[in-house]
Amino acid sequence: MKPLIYGHRGSRTRRPENTMLSYRLAYEEGADGIEIDIRTTADGEIVISHDDSLKRCAGIDMKISDLTWDVLSTIPVHCPDKFGPTFMGSAFIPRLEEVFDWLKNNHCLINIEVKRQLNREYGYIEKKTLDMIKAYGLEERVIFSSFDEYILLKLKELDPAVKTCWLFDTAMADAGKRAKEMGNDAINPSIASAEQYDDLDKAVELGLDVNVWTVNDLHTAQRLAAKGATGLITDLPRELCALFAE
């Protein structure tokens, strides 16, 4: 079976990661979905950024949680380490609403990784995000993932029907069983942890989906798909989509 292809932070090798430019390109390249990271600003807005700081993507050593949305929205995130000044002034951190507005006009799936909010109590970002998903009618197209088990438990407490994935990067012989016991619908293991101790096979046998990250090698992608991976999260959506279209 062909695995679903998720653009990791969009198409981040060709556009600044976790920006609308990156998401649109990943979908144009054929990705079934995108993988994004959410966190909160000082005034409680939900925004998209993998890092808690602007240093790597904007060249500014400031924490997102210390900035209000009005300030953050004016700062270009052009990933100078990767693209130099190419996208200066054309790429910015989006709010989650902007992503959802875009999703209304296509069929793109979305894997939302919820980051631990050190400036917020458990439940804040989870409830606000779930309310937005319902308002936009996106319940069938969203899956949540997190390294933090308490975030996943809180999501299930707020909405038992929501799909959650346990995200991890350390090989564990009983990862599938643990994920199932926590009430998750899937596991999102790194490549290394997916291939050790037959975690992938065991999770599939338990009826869990398996979305492996970050898969950028074509031979590895084929091998994981043959073992039963249901999703591949990649920096190279164009290449993986072409591979499985053959």
Image (spheres, rainbow, N blue to C red):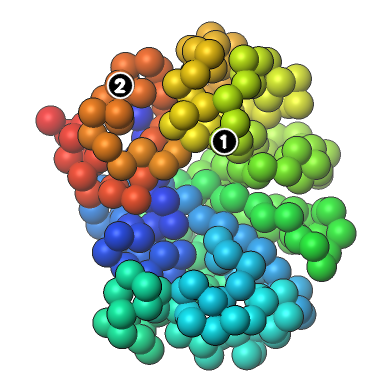
Front residue (pair 23, 107): 23
Amino acid marked by disc 2: Arg
Q: How many marks?
A: 2
| Above or below, comparing residue 191 to residue 15 in the picture | above
Quarter in which the N terminus is drawn: top left
Circle nearer the N terminus (2, 1): 1
Front residue (pair 177, 43): 177
> Which residue is located at x 40 percent, y 18 percent?
228
* Mark drawn on residue 169: 1
**Residue 2 seen in the current view:** no
Dot 1 falls on a residue whose secondary structure is: loop
* Mark drawn on residue 223: 2
- Label 2 Cα neighbours within 10 Å, binned few <14 / some 14-19 / many ≥20: few
- Label 1 Cα neighbours within 10 Å, binned few <14 / some 14-19 / many ≥20: some
Amino acid marked by disc 1: Asp
> Which residue is located at x 56 percent, y 21 percent?
208
Q: Point out residue 138 in the picture as x, y percentages from the top left corner.
A: 55, 50
Q: CA distance from mark 2 to mark 1?
A: 19 Å
**Residue 89 seen in the current view:** yes
Q: Quadrant of residue 72?
A: bottom right
